[in-house]
Image (spheres, rainbow, N blue to C red):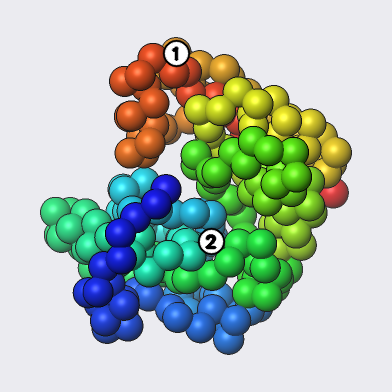
Amino acid sequence: MRIRYKPWARPELEASKFYIDNPEDYKGKWQEVFKNNNPIHLELGCGKGNFISKLAVKNPDINYIAIDLVDAMLGLAKRNVEETYKEANKDVNNLILTRFDIERILLILDKEDSINRIYINFCNPWPKGKHRKKRLTHTRQLEKYKEFLVPNGEIYFKTDDDDLFNSSLIYFEESGFEIVKKTYDLHKEKDFWDNIETEHEKMFTSQGINIKALIAKKIN
């Protein structure tokens, strides 16, 4: 998603207690950041933060790391997190926002971080063949996630894009993941998971596009 430059975003992020600008310094040490031993879940490409803010405030016994690459997007996410927690009358103590290139994720996470779950929501489908290796669900990326996911750790993935979804089923198989659940119409599957709709999800659904989703498990 393209977004206009927001001059306030960088100063607000730097002043925020739940934003980290140097995630490389915490590789293998994320439990120390949260100062507890609760499970850690990760969102890759958090966008404006609507999803992760609602998820984190509902699950205070889980720690969350949300990654994006664009300051303007993270600035909006920061504001949405603050608003969501304020409405719930809670402090933001189980969520960290950080800026990083997901293709280089092994520079900020390793097996010592013991990530239990990854969320990938409506990532760029990169439809052109020469760009497909950039997909967040591509085999090349999945092999990286295996380095820091715990045994039986899960990936929750949803998309509007048919080709990305069908290709991802192959990518997960190639990488040795087990597809625990899959659906080509998430909104008809009431018990598929405790779904939190993203901004993209609402838009695509309003256009009559079915949401595809899966849960994949790391097999060791």
- Circle on res. 50: none
On the image, the x and y values in percent for residue 7 come to 24, 74
The vertical placement of 38 against 140, above or below, is below
Q: Residue 148 falls in which quadrant of the image?
A: bottom right
Task: Name the foreground residue: 63 vs 1.
Answer: 1
Whether residue 185 appears in this view of the structure is yes
Residue under the point 58% across and 66% down: 101
On the image, the x and y values in percent for residue 50 come to 31, 48
Residue under the point 59% across and 51% down: 117
Whether residue 65 appears in this view of the structure is no
Task: Name the foreground residue: 115 vs 83.
Answer: 83
Report helix, strand or loop for mark 2: strand
- Residue 209 falls left or right of residue 76: right
- Residue 90 falls left or right of residue 3: left
Q: CA distance from mark 2 to mark 1?
A: 29 Å
The disc labelled 1 sits on which kind of residue? Lys
Around disc 1, counting alpha carbons within 10 Å, would you say few (fewer than 14), some (14 to 19), or many (20 or more)? few
The vertical placement of 51 against 163, above or below, is below
Q: Residue 209 falls in which quadrant of the image?
A: top left
Residue under the point 79% across and 31% down: 170
Q: Residue 95 falls in which quadrant of the image?
A: bottom left
On the image, the x and y values in percent for residue 201 come to 39, 31
According to the picture, the residue beneath numbered tag 1 turns out to be 188
The disc labelled 2 sits on which kind of residue? Ile
> Does label 2 or label 1 sit earlier along the sequence?
2
- Circle on res. 40: 2
Report helix, strand or loop for mark 1: helix
Around disc 2, counting alpha carbons within 10 Å, would you say few (fewer than 14), some (14 to 19), or many (20 or more)? many
